[in-house]
Each structure stands twice: as C-alpha cells, then as structure tokens.
Image (spheres, helix red, strand yellow):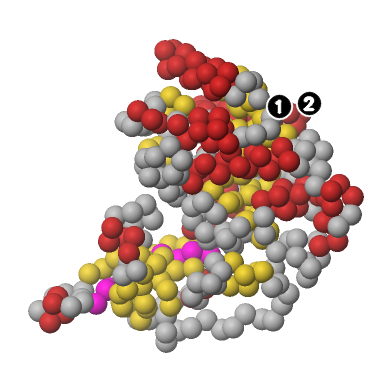
Amino acid sequence: MQWRVGTVRERRRAWGGAIEYAVAVEPVGDAREGGADSLTVRALGYADIVGSLEVGDRVLLNTSALERGLGTGGYAFVVAAPDARPADPAPGPGHIVKARYTPQQQLVLAIDEQESPAHEAFLGGSAAVGDLDGFPVLVADLHSALAPILCGVRSLAPAARVVYVMTDGGALPLAFSMAVAGLSEAGWLATTITVGQAYGGSHEAVTLHSALLAAKYVLGADLAVVTQGPGNVGTGTPFGFTGLAAGEALNAVHTLGGRGLGALRVSAADPRGRHYGISHHSRTAYGRLVLGRATLVVPGLPGEFGELVDAQADDLARETHNRLTLAGEPVDGLDEALATSPVALSSMGRGLDADREYFLANAAAGRYAARLLLN
C-alpha cells in the first residue's frame, strides 16, 4: 500500500453512501524537501466508514491503485480522517464480520444470521431444505451488465420485483456502484443483497445460496440478478479472472433447484481476440464450470457477427454435451429499451454506441427472463 496524507479542498459529488472529494496531497520524500507543491487528486470516501468530511479535514489516503493506473475509476481512497472521526454507530444486532481481519472490518446484520428477524424463515419449509422451486436467477459476468439486463426485463415486465445480488469478485462496497445507486433511486431494483466479503447492500448474506433463498422467500422477488461488483480482475490466463464465479453462481442455482439463466458477454468492439464474439470469460465460466443444467440466452444479432455468435454458442452447447441449453432471443426493440436506462451505459470504458452488441446481449437476456415471468 502507498500511503499519503492530504487535506480536503472540495466536496464534489455523492451517490449511494460514497462521496467524492478533491484532496490536496502533501509531497513525500525528496519532493517535500525540494519544496514541491501539493498534488490534487480525486479521492473517494465511504460515509459509513469514514464519515462525511468537510473542506479542511486532513485525511489519510491509500493511493496504490491510483498511482498504478488500475481500474478504480481514478480514485485514491480515504482510509481515515483522524481529526474528524464519525461517531460510533448505535448499538444493534449483527455479528457477521465482513472485510474480515483487515483494518476496516465491520460488523453487519446478515439476513440469515440468528439475530435477523428473517432467521426463522431459513429454518422451515422450502428455504430450510434449500429448494428454490424453479425461481429464476439471471447470472452475468460483469457489473456493467446489470443496467442493460434491467432494461430488457422492464421492456416486457415493468412491474417485476427484481433483487440484485452482488458477489465479491469486484468492488467489495456496494456504495462504489453509481449504477446501483441510480437504478435503486429510479425504482428499477426492489432491493439489494451483498454476499461473501461484499458489503453495503440493503441486506447482507453470508453466502450466495442464502442470498438466493432470501430473495425468494424473504424479499418476495420475481427474479434475482447476480453479478460481481464494479471492477473485474483478470490476468489474461484461462482461469485467472473473477468473472469465473458466474459459472459457480449457476451451480448454486442448480443445487438449490432454481432456474439458472446465463447472460453471454459479447463484444464486437473489444480489440482482444479472446473477447471478440462470445468472450472466453463466458465460454470458460459456463462451459467448464457449470456442472448442472442451465440456459444461456443467445441474442439474435444481425449479420456476420450474429452468425459468429450463434456458431460459438452452438460450440459451447456441444462441448458441454448439451448440458447448457441455448435459448435465442431477438434484439428487435431493445435499442429503444436501452434508451430508457436511468443510468449511463458503459462497459470496459465503452458506451452504447461503441459496443452496442454487448448491451444488446444483456438486454436480450433480461427480456428472456421477463418472458419466463409472464408465462
């Protein structure tokens, strides 16, 4: 970790419990001795951890990812404001620790734990035996799939009660997601659950399995959508990427007797060959990890690119001995559906115009899920 000390110069914007500041960072080492001026950086602070800061507050920053140019949105992160510490939270239930054994570990009330009002729901009936009874769960690789999926769902079933389940492959704090903040504010999400080491959802769960059971039996969802948080760790190796968990998520759905649906990561704009057409992330996560039955939604894209996607999907189904069922979904009308999104559509730095096929594929998966709800 690279530590820096700075002073808040400006409060810029806030969303979902995250606050962006302009922070003047004090020079270090030789730069300080040489009388160098301070450098102003964008810094993100989570209000429930470090409080709501004011201009003039001194802060301790973690600048590691910022200085390496990694995909954090170009932020330093506020670790603490020693002279402006938030008050202790009011005493309350909850003994589940997230971000465990790190300096910023915190206690949360998990929906499935003993102190939760919903605890009894997990001890009787279908929830106790782990039976989702065909409850539909739509799984995608990247967090950026969430908004277009909801566009597709709402194009047919605008009243559907959708619960978002965020896993811990990307950002751990749900508050980092501008998309979730905007979708929730617009009423497109009924509620959110963070699982594993991820935290900050309207509800917390210890495991993905408990989260899915809670979505159906406690929160009354019509559909659950599962993706990792913002950010995707990748190494350029066949199995070294966090989106691999999409396959494990479908295994969880199968184990619990749900109806697993997989959205394909598709791109006609990604310059990397392994991501052109159906990304190797989808081919590996679904083709190599999924052990039970699941349905992959194949978007009906036009032209030669659409033919490539269809052929790749056929290969994927054949390689799994048709354990994965392909379901075609036309893309007619989905451009109009995507235009209704209350949040900006962006994936890997590309917007709708730059990678239309990616967003259409996810919207198609959402509309297919909506068809199931209406049948």
Q: Is residue 312 above or below residue 345?
A: above
Q: On the image, which quarter does residue 151 sit in?
A: top right
Q: Is residue 374 above or below residue 174?
A: above
Residue name at image x 22 percent, y 69 percent: 39
Circle 2 residue:
375
Of the 4 image quadrants, the one containing the N terminus is bottom left
- Residue 104, given in percent of the width and then of the height, sits at 51, 73
SS at circle 1: helix
Residue name at image x 49 percent, y 52 percent: 170
Of the 4 image quadrants, the one containing the C terminus is top right
Q: Is residue 22 magenta?
A: yes
Please indicate whether residue 180 sits to the left or right of residue 352 in the image.
right
Q: Is residue 303 above or below residue 173?
A: above
Start-end of magenta stretch: 17-26
Q: Nearer the viewer, residue 268 or 11?
A: 268
Disc 1 packing (10 Å; few <14; some 14–19; many ≥20): few
Residue name at image x 45 percent, y 66 percent: 19
Q: Nearer the viewer, residue 236 or 271?
A: 236
Which kind of residue does numbered mark 2 sit on?
Asn
- Characterize the magenta stretch by its predominant secondary structure: strand
Q: Could you say which disc has been placed on residue 371 in the image?
A: 1
| Disc 1 to disc 2: CB gap under 8 Å | yes
Residue 326 in sight in this render? no
